[in-house]
Amino acid sequence: MAAGDPPDNDTIAAAFAEVSDLLELTGDNPHRVRSYASVARTIEGLPRPASAMLADGTLLEVKGVGEGTAARVRELVETGRLALLDELRAKVPPGVVELLAVQGLGPKRVREIWQTLGVSSPAELEYACLENRLRDLKGFGDKTQENVLKGLGFLRRARGKRLLSQARAAAERTLTRLQRCEAALRLAVVGPVRRMVTVVDGVDLLATAHDAAALLEAFVTMPFVAQVRARTATSASVVLEDGTPVSLAVVDEPAWFAALFVATGSEAHVAAVTAAASARGYRLSPDGLVEGRHLVVLEEEEDVYRAAGAPFVPPELRDDAAPAPAPDDLLVAADVRGVLHAHTRWSDGAYSVREMADRARELGFSWFAVCDHSAAASYAHGLDAARVREQWAEVDALNASGETIPVLKGIETDILPDGSLDLPEDVLAGFDVVVGSVHSALRQAPAVMTERLVRAVSSRFIHVLGHPTGRLLLGREGSAFDVERVLDACAAHGTAIELNANPHRLDLDERWLRAAADRGIPIAIDPDAHDLRGLEDVVYGVGTARRARLRRGEVLTALDVDAFRAWCARRRGLPPPAPWPVRPAPGEEEA
DNA sequence: GCCGTTTTCGGCCCGACTGTTTTCAGTCG
């Protein structure tokens, strides 16, 4: 870390999370372990840089941050290192930490495997399984060994992959750095990240420069570069210290828009558009668009499509080879009006209802539906009927004050293993909006899970089926069930489907979203936020929605507060409620 | 490590599921 360039919140959070993992593997106090893990999440969700909050003393006011954490943040800010982390890393081989990511392996089993078998990497563990050495360990058996092998397979497929959010963070950090470089002219993110692909291999950047060599030198010498993989006169690729591969290509200024198009991909799309351009007498390459013997100067990326006689295709739709035109009302970020599905301190969120609603307003949303967990999610302090009523009183008071955007009473109620909902019907009827989600028994047999979900979405008390498959990208496969049957049941009963915008979920999957929308099922793009920063995840939902060609009119959370409440009432067979009272915004006089 | 005190030490998220056991440990949500 360079002097005067304090580590950002993600970097600090990653250090705390790693300390937590390592303490767990060394058999430290479980509460201390959890404390480090929870403070890592807290720092990740802080609205301001932790270094700045440390400087002005506000860091210590954050719940979960004590003197110990403040001291370690200070150490990181001042020295760029954490002695505790260095000590722990010396004790535990890095491959052992990777084993924690195997489904079914926790710290106890990983420790047993590491210390008894001497296994210290996923590859070694796979070999040990194939030699039937795992099943002979105390507390292990055939079934466990089989599941570990399956988990290792999943891990191998996920290795080296990055969530879109991780890649975008790496891209942003790199761009911020390069924009300070005087040699840089234009800079852009290209490749799958620009297309908003949910899981990517790395980050591709494109630039033009006064001095390509100087820009590339600045790129490979960034303080957070861990390794330089390749370097030519016009390109370089590096691996950042968080493991993200980043490549930078520098092109000549007249080639910019052609190169932007080509580097964005997908390969099939570029090939199709290039072929269409060829048929009209143009040659399209990363060096530019050539007609006959001269380079055509392009004013914008759209010119590439004009040369091909094709309609412009937004990057999110370029996975398709054919340049099919986007619908005029393809969803854009500004279309999303409301925040549905966000947690607060009432359950496992980190901020109050008021704080979350205020942040939603700052981000440009016009209504906020609080959706904490229900009681079955006891690990998350889920709400029972009595606490629900207490929360309603708080929401009523907040709305009566008129000090923030309209706050709707919602809940994320558990869908229990038999498909029933986790709160009595008279309580469910009191919410403005009910999201129902599966959080337990995710491994039911497909037929059982299908019936469970069909029963749940058929209830007149549910409005939205939350994160329908329960998948965690790069972490866990979704539950197996008959998606078509569940979608048919949603369509039959007028129940909406969630597009959970958390970048770890992006669930329902983009492939099924189109099928849902084609059935007339409204799609709710929900951040599932647990802190202030999580509210910004809507952007990933919008990207995925665009990839599924969702139109504004197909998105439930694109409705204004009155239309949304009317939809919720109609779902229950009730007349629309009276319009939300209009108040002048704070500080504004009535006209 | 953090928190909240009955202020300096004890408690911290808990129930279900799985696979292993033969009464329960480990993992997960």
Image (cartoon, coloured by chain):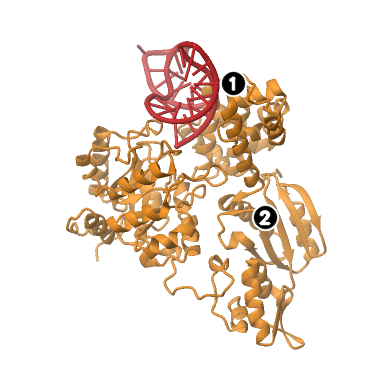
Chain colours: A orange, B red
**Subunit bearing disc 1:** A
Give the residue number, with chain letter if any, for mark 2: A177
Give the residue number, with chain letter if any, for mark 1: A28
Q: Which residue is at 71% across, 58% downward? A: A247
Q: Is residue A270 visible?
A: yes
Image quarter of the C terminus of chain A: bottom left
- Dot 1 alpha-carbon crowd within 10 angstroms: few under 14, some 14 to 19, many 20 or more: few
User: For this view, does A283 lie left or right of residue A559?
Assistant: right
Mark 1 or 2, which is nearer the eye?
1
Q: Amino acid at mark 1?
A: Asp
User: Residue B9: image x %, image y %?
Assistant: 47, 11
Of residues A460 and A361, the one nearer the viewer is: A460
For residue A415, the mark is none
Which structural element holds mark 1? loop
Q: Amino acid at mark 2?
A: Arg
| Residue A514: quarter of image | bottom left
User: Residue A524: image x %, image y %?
Assistant: 37, 56
Of residues A520 and A455, the one nearer the viewer is: A455
**Subunit bearing disc 2:** A
